[in-house]
Structure formats: C-alpha cells, structure tokens
Image (cartoon, rainbow, N blue to C red):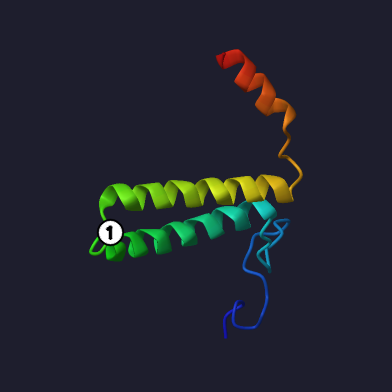
Amino acid sequence: MTAAEQGASVAPRGVRTITGIRVGSGESAILFAAAVSGVSTTVSVLALDTVRPADLLAVELIGAAVMLLSAAALRGRLRSSGRSRVIRSRS
C-alpha cells in the first residue's frame, strides 16, 4: 500500500497540505457572476428567436443596472451626494 492510500501526507517535510477549500466573498461573487453570465447567454440565444435584438439589449442593460444598484444599496454604498456632483459638473 502506498503512503497516499494509508492517509499519510505525500507533501515534502515542512510543507503544509491543504485539506479543505476556503472560498472568500470575492471568489464566491466571481463564481456567481460566471454562472449568471452562462445562463444569461443561453437565455439570450433562446430569446432572440422571439424578441428583436435592440429590445433584448435594452432589457439586459436595465436588468444589469437594477442588479448593480440593488447590490450597492444592500452594501450601503449607494449615496446621493455623489450624484449631485456629477449632475452639476455636466451643466
């Protein structure tokens, strides 16, 4: 029986082995975004059979904006003070 089959570590001495995978909030957000992107692509291909491309683009952009605004609001990073500075600089 080999050392790996007996449950012994096959790593060199002094090197710690990783027994579990830790996923932080950033990694889980990227994983979720990748999954949503894959589903979105599939749904877009199916929707193009019934909806015009310009209409689909508008729906996807509005949906993305709603998701970004809701994420910012949930994290407490949505403030109206920055909005007024942008509006004044464009006038």
Outermost right residue: 76
- How many marks overall? 1
- Residue 46, x across and y down, in percent: 29, 66
Q: Quadrant of the N terminus?
A: bottom right
Disc 1: which residue: 51
Outermost left residue: 49
* Amino acid carrying mark 1 in the image: Val
Q: Is residue 60 above or below residue 81?
A: below
Examine the image and state in which quarter residue 3 appears: bottom right
- Residue 45, x across and y down, in percent: 28, 61
Outermost bottom residue: 1
Q: Is 24 in front, or is 59?
A: 59
Q: Residue at x 30, y 63 (%)?
A: 47
- Callout 1 secondary element: loop
Q: Residue at x 65, y 59 (%)?
A: 12
- Residue 29, x across and y down, in percent: 60, 54
Q: Quadrant of the C terminus?
A: top right
Q: Is 31 in front, or is 23?
A: 31
Left or right of 11? Residue 40 is: left
Q: Residue at x 69, y 55 (%)?
A: 24
- Residue 69, x across and y down, in percent: 62, 45
Outermost front residue: 91
Q: Residue at x 63, y 63 (%)?
A: 11
Examine the image and state in which quarter residue 84 appears: top right
Badge 1: residue crowd in 10 Å (few <14, some 14–19, many ≥20): few
Q: Is residue 3 above or below residue 90?
A: below
